[in-house]
Amino acid sequence: MTKKKLLIADDDAGILAGLRMLLKHQDYQLTFANNIQEIEYFVKTEQFDLILMDLNYDKDTTSGEEGLSLIPRLKSVDENLAIVVMTGWASIELAVAALQKGAGDFIEKPWNNERLVSVLQHQCQLMDQKRKSRTLAEENELLKQELGLNHPTQPVAHSAAMQALLSQIHQLSATDASILLLGENGTGKSLLVNYIHQLSSRRNGLLVSVNMGAINEGLFESEMFGHKKGAFTDAREERIGRFELADKGTLFLDEIANVPLSQQAKLLRVLEERQFEKLGASKTQQADFRLICASNADLNGMVVNGTFRQDLLYRINTLILRLPSLRERVEDIPELCRQFIAQTATKYKKPNAELSPQALRALLDYSWPGNVRELSHTIERAVLIAGSVIEPEHLMLMGDIAPEADSGSPGFEEMTLSEIEKDVIAQRLKSNKGNVMAACRSLGLSRSAFYRRLDKFGL
């Protein structure tokens, strides 16, 4: 482990000798200075983690003015530098002034050895945390830039259905009203949520997305509310929940219909009061977020069946937006294909390919039970196996496709087990009109097993 670099400054040689004896066996690389000029020189020419410095030097021995005026100058060189000041002429006013100037702590001479060592360790820990936070913030900003999340990317909207949808979004983007997105699986809800977030006044906050269908019922409260260390058997460290992460930002609850009935009341309370408690904590925390939910289920039918709370539905459906299926926006398919081809070419460092007229015709004729997500995976696969031109056989479309575009597709006897499984799931999604839970039940699969297959096949 690298030793922390500690600069110790005092004009009393006896003080410096005493501190050397006290700290020589601690994890510090020590440097010593005995006047203001040496302190400034060292800070400008070397990288220190911490300074322990007296407040009085040449000017006088009691006022602390030299040290107080030095603190801002040192901070201007390194804003993350931890500074601990000490003086034999301590007062409350002097301590407050030092902290206001930027010092992290104040030590009175003669010092208590145990407290001095503890203060230095604590300041080093705080300095490490600040640097980690700054690094994470910069990494997050770079990631946002790479993913294009800093600027709203308007969804492809050549079709009348998408143009009408975007018109609605622009009208309501400035509000904080809750939004319920309805539509089949794979229609691009996540992309649309990011677009809404970037248009809103909360664009500088986090967009926290939660797939409610992927959260185990037993972990629901831990995931959403967070927990304190020791709150339950496996709680080895404190965890921040999704509500807390979304503070001042946007919270996106995807597949909201999958929230167990037993947990819906707890969710409703947070949505109504914007308050929650971490597991194992008694303190109530505030949560200020804009709520967006999404579902492909018949929520009104679930209310009638008693599987979804009516008051929860009223809380989440202030504004309702319906995303059209890809079958309803065929005019957008050529532009979507161009985008997906370019993205895949960049991702895999391959030259851009072009769609042959026959391949484009096959794409336009296909019914797309998996919607935009299926189109994205289809194009990605085609770019990887095709040359400069993508032909119908590279698309490997299955199931519901026009006969003239199906000549390159394998028959049932030639299909692999994986291809058959994908075809069955795609057909079942289609027959259930994109309702994931209905398709899941009809196949006798658990929810988690069905979602794993959707991800595997890009449906």
Image (tube, rainbow, N blue to C red):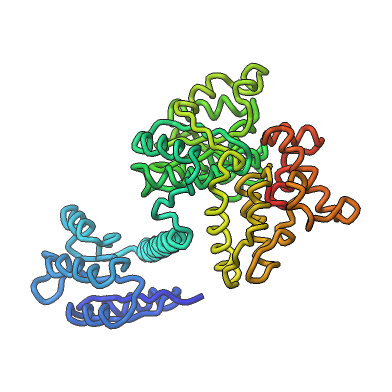
Residue ID at (20%, 54%): 96
Q: Residue at x 30, y 71 (%)?
A: 51
User: In the picture shown, does residue 317 fall above or below 188?
Assistant: above
Residue lying at the far top of the rendered structure = 304
Residue 132: percent from left, percent from top: 43, 63
Q: Residue at x 17, y 81 (%)?
A: 37
Residue at x 40% of width, y 51% of height: 152
Q: Is residue 17 left or right of residue 381?
A: left
Would residue 383 be found to the left or right of residue 129 on screen? right
Residue that sits furthest to the right in the current view: 413
Closer to the camera in the image, 223 or 301: 301
Q: Does 375 sit left or right of 198 as displayed?
A: right
Q: Position of residue 12 (x, y in %)?
A: 21, 78
**Residue 140: % across, % down:** 44, 59
* Between 42 and 458, the one nearer to me in the picture: 458
Above-or-below relation of 304 to 235: above
Q: Nearer the viewer, residue 198 or 66?
A: 198
Give the quarter of the image for residue 141: bottom left
Above or below for 389 versus 378: below
Task: Tell me if I can see residue 277 in this picture.
Answer: yes
